[in-house]
Image (tube, helix red, strand yellow):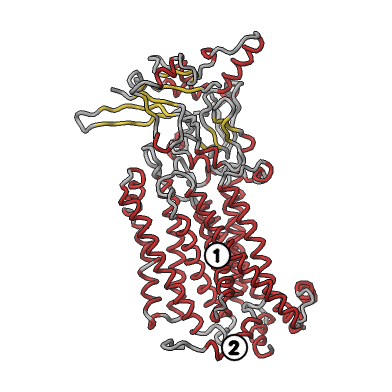
Amino acid sequence: MVRWGMVIDLDKCSGCQACGVACAAESNVAPGSPREAWKGRLIRWLQFLPQAEGTYPNVAAALQPMMCQQCDRPACTYVCPVSATYPNPQGIVAQIYWRCIGCRYCINACPYTTKWFNWWEPQWAGNTAKATNPDVELRQKGISEKCLFCSHRLQRAKERARAERRPLASHEYVPACVEACPTGAIVFGDLEDPQSEVSKLARSPRAFRVLEELGTKPKVIYLKST
Amino acid sequence: MNDIARPILAPMMARPSRAYRAVCVALGAVLLWSMLAWAWQIAYGLGETGLNTPVFWGLYLVNFVFFIGISHAGTLISSILRITDTAWRRPFTRLAEAITVFSLPFGATCVIVDLGRPERLFNVIFYPHFSSAILWDVVCISTYLITSILYFYMALVPDIAVCRDRLTGASPFRRRVYRGLALGWEGTESQHRMLSRIMTGMSIFLFALVISVHTNVSFVFGMTTKPGWHTPLISPFFVLGAIYSGVAAVIFFAVIFRKIFHLEAYLTPRHFNSCAKFLLALCCFWLYAMIVEHLYGFYGKETAELAVIEAKFSNPLFWIMFTLCFPVPFVILAVPRFRTIPNLFVMSILVNIGMWMERYEIIITSGEHPYLSWGTGRYSPSWVEWSITAGWFAGFALLLLIFVRWFPALTLWEVEEEKHEAPATALPEGVKA
């Protein structure tokens, strides 16, 4: 069984936030308005957790890219009353937008606060709605959403492989954030395959998962900055 | 029954006073306004509330817990005290059950108001996911609502029969309602036996249900790993808090209806005194649970947990809440001299304000302090949320007011029983009437 996972090397990460921009463009995340930002209601599937260590003047500050951690034991899917969020057969925590009743229980249950709620109908200025990615559904007000590991790209890759009557190679499926990273800090692939780069990095002594002690078993693994 | 029923039935037939009508119209207006506010929220989305990331749950959930909470008083007073055959319960049971039945619909709808897509509510039935505490809540609360309506109605049947027989001057429509609802009650020996068996059986079932309902309400919070919510103590504490605020609510309405309907002969200071002592015990338990809960978090020094506790302790609202929930009611309830009816009335209001604030503290503070330091959020409710809150309270009061004009505010047949048993329930020593 394939287990799609991600390793983010915080040593290589320069904090340029290109991954966040690529994510928003790929996943049709509306830019939002200053008013929403002021209210704390912006939706960003990939956000940056500010980290600071030490005291002035010896401070090491960094931005840690945080998206849905794609837990193997997700807290969010257990609590959804209508199974609108569920772990799909590829191990990706998926969303069914049309079924979501908007109770925000999943968002509250997520210890990472990486799920988002559409407080308003998403606003697309001018003609920008026409320039959105046709592979990704546009959301409506009153439902929750989050990073899906660009699972539409997996769908595309699978269809291509099937059309060409060959098995899917793992390098064919790459999320947008991984593609955009200029320093190659984000590595994506099959965690079950011991030969893959991602699984080798995941075994590194620098590897850690956020809030590991909660037992959610995230598939996004970070490499500590040294 | 004649002498008992007359003074209770008389005001039901009298023309409603100007003040009563004015209050009803005012409450109705507030309820209507809240409906408009809800329509506004449905049209524009939950962005009309003060909610944000990471405070995803706010006033609606506070009201949900509060309304379900006060609904427990009814069941508690009338079921547990009925099972144990406590004498002082009798004049309170009807009011207590009415509070249950009328607060539950408002509690349940709070959750629907909170939904981002209320029109998809029935997905809970079409696509049920049984590991979700919200689904358990749906099952529990709907069972509770149906059972308590039945229980309330059963105890009402003999009294409706009295209305049917005695209120011959009522409008034809009203008499038809009484005739239908009385189910042909004749007050025979076998009917009384049947009623008593039903009431006992339902009392036992409801007692278990009450505990499980509020435990489930707490599960919605406690089953997540959110700091401040994730503690097993949250369940018993919720049940306790529910009973505490609920019994206070019963005292509040009992004092009001005693005044409006001149029930001084039935709701005597002795009854209030006994109820106050019961409340005193709950008040002490509340302090105990409060200390234990915070001591655990504080002693463990878990970073995220500690952040929530520190935020609570540094918030003046927390200390106002604490003062309203413990020291003030404790002094009024513990000193026999202070246990007067006006004092109890004021205290019952303060306890309910305090308990509402306690739920606010629990829900909002944890919302504002998630595990990761995203830059903690701040929440202040919007006009839509305050309007709906006001409307729900007004609707609850309005239903109670309408009810007491149509049906006896006291359980006539139980009060009559008490009259017959009077010697057995004489004043205990040391209690002033």
Taking depth in this image into account, of B145 and A88 the one nearest to the observer is A88
Quadrant in the rendering for residue A187? top left
Q: Quadrant of the N terminus of chain B?
A: bottom right
* Label 1: which secondary element: helix
Residue B176, x across and y down, in percent? 80, 74
Decide which of A157, B66 is in the foreground and name it: A157
The amino acid type of the residue labelled 2 equals Glu
Numbered disc 2: what chain? B
Please identify the quarter of the rendering in which residue A126 is found: top right
Please name the residue shown 57% across and 59% down the image: B391
Can you say whether A129 is above or below B384 in the image?
A: above
Residue placed under numbered mark 2 in the picture: B421
Q: B166 above or below B138? A: below
Q: Quadrant of residue A93?
A: top right
Q: In the rendered structure, find residue B72 and report the number of the disc placed on it.
A: 1
Q: Earlier in the sequence, mark 2 or mark 1?
A: 1
Single out the mark in the foreground, 2 or 1.
2
Kind of residue at badge 1: His
The answer to whether residue B181 is visible is yes
The residue at the point 55 percent across, 69 percent down is: B76
- The x, y position of residue B405, in whole percent, is 66, 75
Q: Answer left or right for B6 relative to B58.
A: right
